[in-house]
Amino acid sequence: MRSDVTLIARQLLGKRLCTRADGIVTGGLIVETEAYSEREKGCHAYKGITPRNAVMYEEGGIAYVYLCYGIHEMFNIVTNRRGKADAVLIRALEPVVGVDVIMQRMKARSEKKLTAGPGKLTKALGIDRSRNGRSVSSADLWIEEAETPEDIVCGPRIGIDYAGDDAHLPWRFSLRDNPWVSK
DNA sequence: TACGTGATCACG
DNA sequence: GTGATCACGTAA
């Protein structure tokens, strides 16, 4: 293993995720993540490789973006070595860079809850499936060191009841009491 | 709590 | 081809 996906999910908290979309830079602090691994039933790669999940099997450091419920783009970071399908879903951000643009994209008047949820933050940062398989260390999509989290909490992942026992794994991580964490 | 929404995948 | 399902968000 390159590194355990749950460790990487924790380490991503507090970092700043930025994109350039339509020539505009927006970004936010990562405050909530979830880990997924091919060895548990919550993961898209549990039953093996398919056209959709193929990028999860690539060398880590690229994006896995897919459409969920026909509406929402979901943004993950692939984390393991080639052939080992692990990924971290980014579930919530605290908006920091280009907040005015983010508010326009979200058609919001208040900054509240702009990016609290995996489907919302992709819209806010202009991430869609065209980013699938692209590096997360590029001029259009990158991660910066920012804050060192003081208090991380974990719990079961959201929306994966189909995973049976694995739905109870405490693989969701967030910053304690952070107001930008999703419901 | 209910449902929109359309890609995806396991069938045949 | 077809149909069930889905790592959500919003309205109510």
Image (cartoon, coloured by chain):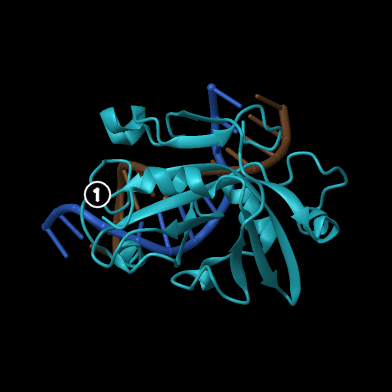
Chain colours: A cyan, B blue, C brown
A76 lies left or right of A99: left
Query: Residue A20 or A104: which is nearer the viewer?
Result: A20
Residue A169 in view in this figure: yes
Residue drawn at x 34%, y 31% as measured from the top left: A167
**Residue at x 36%, y 31% (from the top left corner):** A161
Up/down of C6 relative to A181, above or below: below
Counting every numbered tag in the picture gives: 1
> Is A41 drawn above or below residue A86 in the view shown?
above
Is residue A62 found left or right of A101 in the rendered image? left
Tell me: A123 left or right of A98: left
Tell me the chain of label 1: A
Point 61% across, 39% down: residue: A149
Q: Is residue A8 above or below residue A172?
A: below
Q: Is residue A77 above or below residue A149?
A: below
The amino acid marked with disc number 1 is Tyr
Dot 1, how many residues are within 10 Å of its Cα: few (below 14), some (14-19), or many (20+)? some
Q: Nearer the viewer, residue B12 or A137?
A: A137
Q: Secondary structure at mark 1?
A: loop
Residue A32, position as x, y percentages in the image: 56, 41
Residue A171, given in percent of the width and then of the height, sits at 40, 36
Q: Which of the 4 quarters of the picture holds residue A116? A: top right
Residue A87 position in % (x across, y down): 39, 54
- Pointer 1: what residue? A46
Quarter of the image where the N terminus of chain A is located: bottom left
Q: Quadrant of the C terminus of chain A?
A: top right
Can residue A159 be spotted in the picture?
Answer: no
Q: Position of residue A60 (x, y in %)?
A: 38, 64
Residue at image location 66% in from the left, 63% down from the top: A18
